[in-house]
Image (cartoon, grey):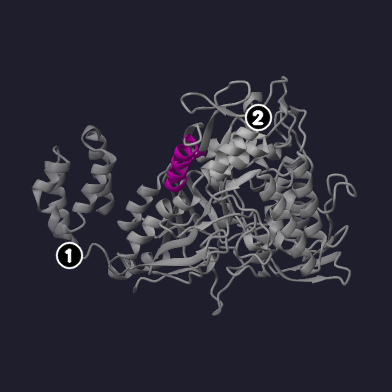
Amino acid sequence: MLGKFYALLQSRSQESTEYWGEQARWGFWRKIRSPFTILNMSVWHQFYPRSRHLILFLLTLVCLLPLGSCQPSQFRSQTAQGSQLVLSTLTDPKTFNYANNQTFPSIFLFAYEGLTREDGEGNIQPGLAESWTISEDQRRVTFTLRTGLQWSDGQPLTADDVVFTYRDIVFNPDVPTDAKDSIRIGPNDRFPQGVFPSVRKVSDRQVEFLLPEPFAPFLRATAAPDGILIMPQHKLAESLRTKGADGNLQFISTWNTDTPPQDIVVNGAYLLDSYSPGQRLVFRRNPYYWRKDAQGNPLPLIERIVWQFIENTDTQLIRFRSGELDVMGDARPLRPEYFSLLKQEDRRGNFTVYNGGPWSGVLYLTFNLNRAQDKDGNPIVDPVKLSWFSNLAFRQAIAHAIDRTRINNNIFRGLGIIQNSPISLQSPYFLKPEQGLKVYDYDLGKAKQLLQGAGFRYNAQQQLLDAQGNRVRFTLLTNAGNKVREAIGAQIKSDLSDIGIQVDFTPLNFNVLVEKTSTTRDWDAHIIGFTGGIDPHGAANLWLSTGGSHSFNLKQQTGQQPIQGWQPYPFELDIDRLLIAGARELDETKRKAIYADYQRVVQDNLPVIFLVNDRALMAARNTINGIQYSGLPSWGLWNIDQLQIRRDR
């Protein structure tokens, strides 16, 4: 009978589309949650003027419900089997192909694992590998896989898949993946463009890596969620043997978001169940997942995850407060004003607001410094603007003109952390200003002095002009829907107007923004965040001049349209040298000294201007057991396979 009721309701809904908007439907459902409300015909006529027949049907249904049409035991069984977690993110995933991924969050948090795993305190734990050994000279690392590992289609996961992932995907020069940068070993002058470890299968359960030299970040590079994740050879190997019409490997266009979710084979806690673009992606429990809890029960404990795409954080807040979302702030910390509001409602709403201290990522503004030309010989950046952006005094003036204290007080409610370093505050390599790190405090006088010293001047209207008389004006981008970044962009627009610069601030869909910064290079300046962690080398794909996320001067990337005349700046080569030296150094005291120099070079040359970093804030229903939240992991639900829904709280 309930099925017939649903079918009838659907047909009536189609009949009266002109009367119903999305919000009206939601209000309608909220009002009929009680059977007694169904008897109130004024409510029904408010939402559904043509509903006399439906009302009579519902009255009959209400009368029949007490007669036992739903058996309590059957309902409890369905509820226990159907536990689900409802999460949200601002935009759809850009890809289902791990090698193509450059965004966070992504499906790979839920669906894939690496040889090792990083916990909430930054420790490296066993993952798909149950153990590993490292030779005395630090150059030979042997991993032993767990017994009986399987892919989500039931096929065995063996050492062949590990070798395939590293050798055929990550180390493949024809595959453009940011994962390369985390494990590229050696200086360019010794190993051309760096080299990768050799990897070989010892047995079905053992894999050996031979490093060309000691490499301190190696284990962390193998760790989920931010390190190299293992891919299925039996599903992807053929795509790496064939090329498409564009001359690129077929693999590059394999497993895009138009691929049926059922075709994606995974090794993580959850597999893809269904995808509705612009609405949601549903994950369900992977029956072949290897982990078990302390009592020997198979994990994960939650059957289903509904990942909703909600392109506005205010809307996310409304849905969390109404009970539609179970967690808010797991991938990107809560906005500070949300924190204050939700702290007042936590008891009544039966949820907890977590404060994990400073978040480990960074938030920055950067300019397009690319001096290259496209395939037709046209400059990637307008030469007039490039002359401003590439001028160090110009970037320093911008840094002094941005009132970061005001950003923290007004936008972060004093909860943010003013950032001056590319390294996370939690890292043992983090350098404080009192240790010699340059800081750009808010100083309009200093900003104007720097500009005028670099040949800029002001007209009668106090508009800034360059030496050739061009008005200084540029476009600033960020991702739409992130209200913190939108507010920061609006303030920067105001701040820079105080030194005569016109900023055209334009928030964009996140995937469009990523396309501009990582592919077309069609941008002037943008505000974006980047995840952090314990080891500075984890951000190598951002900071190495060859890195796939090195957006401020992005080199030719595999599979992209060719560019001409790209060249790094001298300070970029200094950063390359220091990151490589830090990775090959095993003595911790020496590593700290190297990374201190690296931070100084970044701040002295300002390829990016650091803003205010988030505090790690997250809200979650008290029905969720097992949360281990802190500011260090890039994802607040890093142990999602161990979470459990309790219905007695």
Q: Residues within 10 Å of mark 2 (few under 14, many from 20)?
A: some
Magenta stretch: includes residue 563: no
Left or right side of 396 for 629: left
Note whether 236 is above or below 432 in the view shown.
above
Magenta residues (range): 478-497
**Front in this rendered view, residue 387 or 538:** 387
Q: Secondary structure at mark 2?
A: helix
Magenta stretch: includes residue 489: yes
**Front in this rendered view, residue 74 or 649:** 649
Question: Which amino acid, mark 1?
Answer: Pro
Residue 348, position as x, y percentages in the image: 27, 67
Left or right side of 300 for 569: right
Q: Earlier in the sequence, mark 1 or mark 2?
A: 1
Instruction: Name the residue carrying label 1.
Output: 66
Residue at x-position 88% and y-position 72%: 136
Residue 224, position as x, y percentages in the image: 64, 60
Which of the two marks, 1 or 2, is nearer to us in this view? 2
Instruction: Name the residue carrying label 2.
Output: 386
Q: Secondary structure at mark 1?
A: helix
